[in-house]
Amino acid sequence: MGGTNENNPGLIGPSNFQGGSRMGVSKIMPQMANHHRRALSTINQNTMGATLYPCVVRKREFSGEHAAKLGSKQQHCLEETKNPVPSAPNPSGLRDYTVIDVEEYEDPSDVSVPMFVKHTEAMLDEIDLMEEVEMEDVAEVPILDIDSSDTKNPLAVVEKIEGSSCVSPNYITHQFDINDKMRAILIDWLIEVHYKFELMDETLFLTINLVDRFLERHTVARKRLQLVGVTAMLLACKYEEVSVPFVEDFVLISDKAYTRRDVLDMEKLMVNTLQFNMSVPTPYVFMRRFLKAAQSDKKLELLSSFIIELCLVEYEMLKFPPSLLAAAAIYTAQCSLYKSKQWSKTSEWHSNYSEHQLLECSRLMVTFHQKAGSGKLTGVYRKYSTSKFGYATNSEPALFLLDLW
């Protein structure tokens, strides 16, 4: 805009009131000449009867809608200044006018703060208060981010659909020639074979999962149960291992009870029955994640592995989902090592299991730990009695958990 309003040349535009000069007064004063204005020094100082219209101009720049509002207000004030209200008559018969310097007269209390500014300030204050409360909560219960170090690791999967790996806890009742004790013997033997072949931990857990899922869907004669076991391990090796044992190795380890053709035929039957679904979350997958949440050391890792492998042999543990087995194994191992209940907020957050939810499974694990060295099925106990596995069997079971029944 220019110095004057296009519609009314007698009005002063808002832009003339910005800056450090007194352009507002210099433009106004010539307009007063028609009213026979006197000099300010000779104006009657008695203005008690006059009505003043102070026009306050903030020297802070505005833009958009608020600049338009401010300009309208300034023009309104100037119009009232051009046509001032007369004060009380004086003896000279002349009317007195009061001219107000719009730049020197500043009273911030006369300028109302826009409502949106008040709302914004109130909202920001509330957000600051919320952030302070949240910071206090974090300080009280710290939850560690256990995934930040694995953001670029495609093998460190955070979320898994474990329903695909679960089996019915009573599937063995549909088998006409095998029972849970025969299954336990097979699993205990497979753990020894796995140890002898020096295979990866993932391979063992996947082997047991393939055995259970196949037996749930297909009936098997007792004399072919061992064949199911070695074939499941062959498939797991092909899925997990870099160097896979030969078929002849599995034939030899089963004391040549089966031929190479038997193993290959069972392999085709098994993959078709399972529809080639080998990508399932086993307890091992969850245990690796929960160990990070527990900030474990090597001793806790080995003891947790010992406890969860004891559960692989037990048919009754199939009623627990893989994630619960993993969490309970770590919880039980912590209780065994530290002689007290240990389950941090970080472990509870990342496992989605509270300490109360783990107790039933954990108590069963304590009984397995207690009798691990006795009986006929001692494959897991002998494995973890070696220096390679840190003599994990020397740890005392957390018997105090049994007293919480």
Image (cartoon, rainbow, N blue to C red):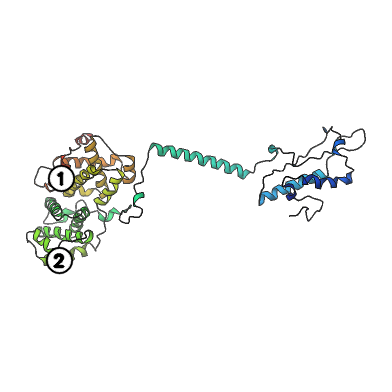
| Residue picked out by circle 2 | 264
- Residue 33 screen position, x and y as percent: 88, 45
The count of marks equals 2
Quarter of the image containing the N terminus?
bottom right
Residue nearest the viewer, comparing 120 with 17: 17
Residue lying at 18% horizontally and 38% vertically, measured from the top left: 397
Q: Is residue 385 left or right of residue 12?
A: left
**Residue at 26% of width from left, 52% of height from top?**
285
Image point (19%, 63%), residue name: 270
Residue type marked 2: Leu
Tell me the distance, in whole angstroms, between the alpha carbons under discs 1 and 2: 37 Å
Disc on the earlier residue, 1 or 2: 2
Q: Residue furthest front?
A: 21
Residue 368 makes an appearance in the image: no
In-front residue for pair 356/287: 287
Q: Which residue is mark 1?
A: 387
For label 1, the SS is helix
Figure quadrant of residue 21: top right
Would you say residue 40 is visible in this rendering? yes
Q: Residues within 10 Å of mark 1 (few under 14, many from 20)?
A: few
